[in-house]
Image (cartoon, rainbow, N blue to C red):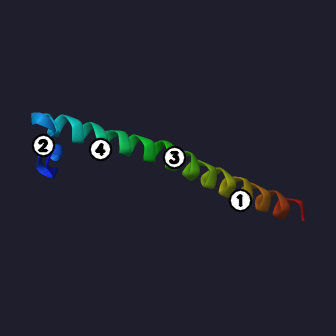
Amino acid sequence: MTVAEFFHMGGYAFYVWTSYGLTLIILLANILAPLRQRRKILADLARRERRARSMSQ
C-alpha cells in the first residue's frame, strides 16, 4: 500500500476525509463551547458582584 493509495481510500476518500474533518470539528466544539460559556458566566458573576458592592456603599 502506497501513501497515495492510503489517501485515496479505495475511491471513498471524499467521504472518509469529510467524516474525519466533521468529527474533528464537532469534538473541538464540544471542548471549546463549555470553556467559552464558563468564561462568560464568570465574567457575568463578577460584573454582578461589582454592581452589588457599588449599590451597597
Nearer to us of marks 4 and 1 is 4
Asked if disc 3 and disc 4 are in contact, CB closer than 8 Å, the reply is no
Secondary structure beneath dot 1 equals helix
Residue 32: x and y, percent? 50, 50
Residue at position x 51%, y 46% from top? Answer: 31
Q: Earlier in the sequence, mark 4 or mark 1?
A: 4
Q: Is residue 55 left or right of residue 1?
A: right
Q: Distance between the residues labelled 4 and 1?
A: 38 Å
Asked if disc 4 and disc 2 are in contact, CB closer than 8 Å, the reply is no
Residue at position x 72%, y 53% from top? Answer: 45
Q: Please give the residue where the numbered disc 4 appears in the rendered image.
A: 21
Nearer to us of marks 2 and 1 is 2
Residue at position x 37%, y 44% from top? Answer: 24
30, above or below 47, in the image: above
Secondary structure beneath dot 3 equals helix
Nearer to us of marks 2 and 3 is 2
Q: Is residue 43 left or right of residue 32?
A: right
In the orientation shown, which residue stands out farthest toward the left? 11
In the orientation shown, which residue stands out farthest toward the front? 1
Residue at position x 29%, y 44% from top? Answer: 21
